[in-house]
Amino acid sequence: MMNIDFNGFTLNQVMHVMDILQAKHKTLADNIANTNTPGYIRQDVNFSQELKKVLEAPAVTSGDAGSSASGPDPLVYRDIEIQRDTDQPVKTDGNNVNLEQEMVNLGQTNQVYEFMAKMASIQYKLASYIVRGGH
């Protein structure tokens, strides 16, 4: 697969950012589901830290073993770090989930995911156009 650069992001990078956002969404959903669980400590995916890993990852070229595209090594991104958030105030039951904040974070994560999905769609369409010889 060709890997076209789109506003500084390659398709591989876009797909990996979407993986990070999916992990963040799942983590937020887990937090929401455990809002009333005594002793539950919220978890989070540090999007900025994970994005930095994507942008700084070494590129794989089409000549590397097991690779058919240029761009970051897909194996670099399978270990998205989920962190316990001990910075939030803890309620009397030992739980530190703030439902309102989790819902705001979920909405923001969804918006960024939709944007990245549009970027991926545009890249696929552009690649298809190029492969067809501009037709």
Image: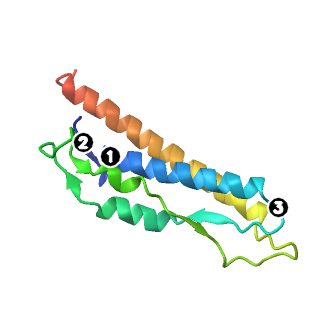
Do the numbered discs 1 and 2 sit on residues whose CB atoms are within 8 Å? yes
At which x and y percent is residue 21?
A: 52, 52
Q: Nearer the viewer, mark 3 or mark 1?
A: 3
Q: Which mark is residue 83?
A: none
Instruction: Say whether residue 120 is left or right of residue 63.
Output: right
Give the spatial CA distance, label 2 vs label 3. 45 Å
**Which residue is label 3 attached to?**
37
Residue shown at the point (77%, 61%) measured from the top left: 100
Q: Nearer the viewer, mark 2 or mark 3?
A: 3
Q: Earlier in the sequence, mark 3 or mark 1?
A: 1
Q: Secondary structure at mark 2?
A: loop
**Which residue is label 2 attached to?**
3
Residue shown at the point (50%, 63%) measured from the top left: 81
Q: Secondary structure at mark 1?
A: helix
Q: Secondary structure at mark 3?
A: loop
- Using the image, determine if residue 57 lies above or below residue 9: below
**Which residue is label 1 attached to?**
12
